[in-house]
Image (cartoon, coloured by chain):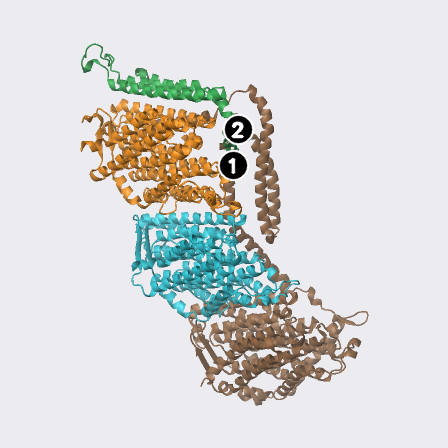
Amino acid sequence: MALFHNYYDSASIVLFGIGLATLMLNKNLIKKIIGMNIMDTSVFLFLVSKGYIAGRNAPIITDRYEGVTAYVNPIPSALILTGIVVAVSVTAFLLALTIKLYETYGTVDLEEILKVKGDDHEVNNQSSLD
Amino acid sequence: MKLITSLPLIEILILFISAFLMPFVRKNKNIKIVSVTALTFSFILSVVIVINVLQNGAFYFNTGYIDTILGIQLYIGPVESLLNSLFLFVIILVACFSFFTIDSEIRENRIKLFYIMVNLLSASILGVIFTNDIFNGYVFIEVAALTSCGIVVVKETQDNIKAALKYLIMSTIGSGLILMGIAFIYSFTGHLNIDLIHQAILEDYTQYQKALLITIALFTSGLGVKSAMFPLHTWLPDAHSTAPTASSALLSAIVLKPFAFFLIKIMYRMIGFDLVNQFNIITIILTLGCCGMLFGSLAAIFQKNIKRLIAYSSIAQMGYIFFGIGLGSPFGAAIAVYHMIGHAVTKSALFMCSGLMIEKTGYKTIDNYKGLGHEMPITFALFTLGAFSMIGIPIFPGFISKWYLSIECIHLNQLLLIFVVLASSLLNAVYYFPIIINGFFGIENLKNKEYHSKKVETQKLLPIAALILAMVLLGAFSKNILDFISPELH
Amino acid sequence: MQYLLLAPILFPFILSIVLLFNKWEEKIRNRWVLCGIIINFLLLIHNVFILKENRIHVLKLNEFIDIYIKMDTAGIVFCFLVSFLWILTSFYSIGYMHDERKQTRFFIFFTATLGVTNGIALSGNLITLYLFYELLTLFTFPLVIHAGNETALKAGYKYLIYSFGGAALSLFGMFMIFSKTQSLDFIPGGIIQPVFTKELSYYFMAYVLTFCGFGVKAGLVPFHSWLPSAMVAPTPVSALLHAVAVVKSGIFSLIRMSYFIFGPTVIMLIKGNDFALVFILITILTGSFLAIHQKNLKKRLAYSTISQLGYIMLGLVVFNPDSFAGGMLHMIFHAFIKITLFFCVGAIMHITGKTEIQEIQGLGKQLPILMWCFSLSAISLVGIPPTNGFVSKWFLAIGSLQTGSFVIPIVLLLSALLTAGYLLPIITTAFFKPIPAGESVYTEPSPFMLIPIIILTGIVLLTGLFPNPIINILDTIAISVI
Amino acid sequence: MILSAENLLFLIILIPAISAFIGLYIGMNSEPARNAFYTGTIIIVFALVCFLYPYAKSSSLHYHMAGIMGTGLYLKLDMLRYVMIFLTSFLWLLAHIFSTHYLLKYKHRNRYYMFFILTFSSTLGVFLSEHILNLFTFFELMTVTSYFLVIHDEDEFTHKAGYIYIAMSIAGGLIQLMGIFLLYNYTSTLLINQLPLEIENIGNIKYLIAILIMIGFGVKACMFPLHIWLPKVYPPVPSPATALFSAVLTKTGVFGVFVTLQLMNFDRALSAIVLFIALINMFLGGLLAIHHRNIKKVFAYSSMSQLGYILLGIGLIGLLKDHSRHIYFASVFHMINHGLLKTLLFFGSGVVFMELQKLSLNEIKGFGKNMPFFKFTLAVGFMGTAGIPGFNGFASKTMLHHALYEGTGILNGPFVTFIEVIFFISSAFTAAYLIKIYSALFCEENRAYNSIYKKDVTNKYAIAPMLLLSGMIILIGINPGFLLTILGFSDAYNLHLFTLKNIENALVIAACGYGIYHFYIMKRLRVKTSSDYEYINPTYEWFDLEKNLYVPVLFFLFKVISFILYAFDNILVFIAGKLSSFAKYLFSIEFYRDISYYNRLINLYFKMKTRRLNQKERTRNLFQNSRNNIEGLLNKKEENTRNLIQNSRENIESLIQNEFKVNEDQKINLKRKIQDLSFSLSSITYSIIVFAFILAVLMVSMLII
């Protein structure tokens, strides 16, 4: 069965599922952000596992260059570096917004925040069917 | 000759550099000047690119001048160049418009942030259009997502932040899916460059039937979220209606389009027409497009807030674009691109007009706009022209894209789809006409409204007028635009 | 020289723009409007008789959007009818709009509509016709809601939705035709060549769609209810638009579609005319039956227009030279008669403010000239032999009998009886009912209103007694087309 | 040259038409000038008609004027048509003289005279036209112009009469038009002289055509099923006009029937139909005339029965194919006599109406007790109509009778005897009702009038025409041969009408008439009231063809069709209304984005409950609305539609109000519930759920396909 011998793919798919579920189901903003990070890491795992060639070591040149065959395929790992940068920046932005919301609403529970009507006046007459 | 081919990269770099320089500029006035000069300069470059492509066809550009495709490759065909110049044209006009309106909408210290975001956003949009490398595309999509969320949140009211948060979460899910899609493609083709992937897929796609299907699904849903495809559009009305006018104009008109175009690139250049038609994902996109068209217009009918109304109408128009893609024929994709251009020009004009209306009357609900046609006649006239293109009065681009869509439907002998196209344009009429009629006619509408009382300064009106003029020209020269676009997509 | 062809279409637009931009006081503006429209009529005469060329491609955007103006006999006949009646209506509306508000706005759109209707008449292909068809709705809309009150706005909405719905349907039909024939130019006898058996249902659907699309403006039954509710407009508008310009352009586009695009042979092949016949017979009966119930005079005339339009469409759907000539004749005669009736009702409303039928008791004695014109036109609409209503009914009946169907003449005659049913009571109440006590004395309307009415009644009676010249012209068209 | 014979034909029609309008203009300022002018024109026309006699006698005149009325104007003059126009112009002259005196107390005289002369010109047109379309045109013109005479008095009663008259004539005219359409379609010519040979070879469609055309003429000739307008129209019309209605306009109908039969070259079946209807006419006319009290109604029914006689003659022409000359001249002769007699009678009723303004026998009893001249003239009229020897009625009736005998050879016996019996009974009825009127008018005792009406009718304008007419009646009565030779009947003199047998036969009829009068009328119809005898009229309870059959059927048909077509009228508006309300309901859910999912479920539940109660209440008043619709209050149509929309608008408002009401109280108890129950999904998560669901569906569908 394909699932048993490529552990990395199945692991990353499972991780992706967990990340997606936490992102969606939790009310707490912080949990959502954590869920998002899990999702991203699962994708990175999947990508890195694609580049892995058994019996070779990481594509980092310590003291001397041992030739192409000694190292694992470097491209996926390079991709993941940019992926991590992107994930970090998004998390930073999300946290900033959550702090701002916390300052005004005093709670991080998204449901509470959404139930309180917004401050600018035209919002309230939007939702009722007048 | 080499210099010409590197122009696209220069364009993107100019915009990025200008964005990075802006924090050092002290006064807001200079910020605006820097931003617009960067944009105009890149617009000039884009026009040069278009002429170059017109003369000697599409060309590739490998960053780093290495002829081997190791670095990131940009592909500049007729569609890309045209989209690039037209989007820049609209962004410049929206920026000029924002010079005067942004001060009243957002706080003093946020203006600098706004213009940085605008430049970054335009840079990333050009990147998404040009790249021939899917991971590079992913990076630019991420930058675009963050910056577009930035220009939404810059208003910092309660609702605004909530909407921005909702938008950001939804787009992160989208980009997660796209990344997973890229990972899948990489896993079984080993390349990131679109053309190489295409050759790889053509060789042995039979083994990866299921994987290919999943990647297409991932890309569709990921990009669908970002470009407000029907079921995944719930973030758009809140984000666009609470954002400041300039940014909502940018968002609706420009930001949604590159993601849809990226989907076209993946579908037709990476995987190829015949292969894509085998999977029934195309019919799903088609049905979602139709539902989008109908749902968008129907929802807009019951809207009271004018910005939400126009936001819902852009969902409907995105529905048209996905309808074009969903037809599965190269000509369908060409019409989708043409509609992108037409809609970009019209929607930005409509948003800017509604912004002016809100600024002058202080209300956002339509019922307060009775007799407005009398008070601010020019803005309302421009709004009416924009609305006419949406409704599909002949000569305007709206009508032409509807005509071509229907002709394409008949060629693929699906006559029922034409009903959907016409029904949605009729529904447009149902919600645009009351605004226009109540504005211009009716005794009690015009009871105590003096003529020209809410006069709008001309410099705010110039960009809108330019856009409407561009719209009419687009309508007039639709034939040669389409001849310019369609060969490339075959 | 070729561009003179566009004069009848562009000149009214220029005139309306001139009116828009200078704020003249009433007298000068009236003079401008009058001589503008008369010049337009002269230009038309010049084009028809002196100008050599009769076709011009104004704008060719792409293979389907191309504005193409062509003068052929059918177009000229319709154009003459419209331009001539426009002169008389402008006289009348100057008199009528004297003490109304927002007159300049009225005259701006009034002149612009003339240009659009001429455009419909002279258009050379279906897409130009569709373009002017849409513009007609947009330009007539402000006229319909001229009164500006709530009911007028509601009627305006209804009119807009119906017209745009119809336009969308006909657009759908045009898509289908265009995708098969790659061109929409009008060629007498139709441009759809060999129809293969498998394509029959395709063309039938195209025919049905275009027929219903253009039928909306021509008052076909299920789509007609905008006409009575549009009666809220001032009388020159309802007289001109809902008796001549709007409805007749609906009919004219039906003629163009069925005789110059589909062609009689094809329509008979796809049995489109049987489909249309059912709708038309219902239109005739609905129009006349419901007219009897209406108390309001204008509403009654509106429903009568619907039924008379049914006559004209009947003439067009029965593919036979006699009935075609009958249909066109009735189009011309009905235009003259109905516009006189509307003018008289308008004059009555203008002077006495009365609109209901039982209010105008004994009015005939106070306004003899007006009511005599009304009675003569009403009698000629009923179709009593010496009048022109009878002539067109004669051709219609003979034509339909030649195709062997008994139903059409019977419906024609039943509806003639009903026409008498709803028009004669007006004459009897006006002339033969005693003037109620305490009725204030009314005098005849101003000459501006009265002269057009008298001229029109004269024309109605004249064409009734000597219809031959018109019949010959129409026969030439009929032969070339069927 | 313009006065050449052919042009005269057209002039005869043109002169009165133009003079009508000139007279109207003259009448504006001076009455006598206008009267003189009109008398002058009629005299000129009469003179022209007399001038034309030699042409008519020798050969037939033809006149053709191209262009007018699309098909051109074809006029023809032969002996029959000459008789008709002579009779018309002569009677019109007398009626005009009579009306100058009669209308003194009337208003709108100007208008009356105009339409009087216009009807004259169109009647002449009917008799002269040779092209069926011209005939039809003048026929319709005559209808319209005479209609304006009918509604001259402008009161409610005349308008009802006018309505029936115009409705029936136009309906008849249109049915006739249908016949003409078919005729033209099959023969492609409409000239009367060319038609007979064309009609041979068009097969038995010609019967349908003939019947349709005859219905049109039947309305005017008061044939049986179409006679209902007669009793209603004659009383309100001013007497001179009624005289012309009965004497001349009915003749146009009969002339039309004759022409149609001529076209069909006297087909046996068609003549049998005409004969059958004639018999009904004769019998029914007489029967109803006996019962009625209003003298104009009596004379109306009497002219119906006399027309029966003429139609009998025309019917017989067709049946007695070879020697039909005899019967032809009999019916023409009877037409002339009937014209003269009816004019005289109606002039009499006019004189009575002038003095008393009443027409019912009960009121005018004993009016003419001591008025010798009046009594003499009416007596002559009654004698003539009853067919007493020595008067013109007798001559023509006996000629008809003779023709019947000749017919015995051809028709089978019993049929002739049947006709014979009907002939006898209806003549007896005629005698009966004439005696009834004579005795009521002249012999009854009426103290009220004795004092007032001592001396005779003074006005010479009224009495002169009556005297002239009675003189002619007697003259023709005595020497019928003279008139017949003028008509061109060769062996007029050896007719020997005054044989003993005929006279004896006529006297027996008169006796039976008196018998019917004495036993039936005096006993049954004269009831002894307190002071005096009172005539009652039982026919009102009888089955009245119009009230019980025509009106209810037509009204029901009209209502049903209007209702169906009304449904067509706003079928689209109804559907649009339903669609928009459904869409509105659909989207109201979408916008409760602030209240949590659970709340929304409760909200929905509440709404469904409230909707169900309004549903019941709304269906109740919807049912109520549709009930009063069905009751056929169609003229309430506007209010219904308005309150239907009103209800639906109120329902929507009430829906919204109680939604808020529901929201308020619902919120209160919900708040308490929510505190302990923290489970809720925010709108963002709501949309993500949707998204996840779709993604799942996508995945599953991928895997399956």
Report the residue that reaches farthest toward the top. A63
Q: Which chain is orange?
A: B
For disc 1, the marked residue is D585
Q: Residues within 10 Å of mark 1 (few under 14, many from 20)?
A: few
Residue type, numbered disc 1: Tyr
Report the residue that reaches farthest toward the front. B27
Exactly how many numbered labels are in the figure?
2
* Most foreground residue, D387 or C455: C455
Horizontal and vertical percent for residue D454? 77, 81
Residue D600 tag number: 2
Horizontal and vertical percent for residue B486? 27, 40
Residue B346 tag number: none
Residue ID at (26%, 41%):
B484
Q: Specify the subunit that label 1 lies on.
A: D
Badge 2 element: helix
Q: Horizontally, is D242 left or right of A120 in the view?
A: right
Q: Which chain is green?
A: A
- Give the drawing colour for chain C: cyan
Q: Horizontally, is D114 left or right of C29 in the view?
A: right
- Give the drawing colour for chain D: brown
Residue type, numbered disc 2: Arg
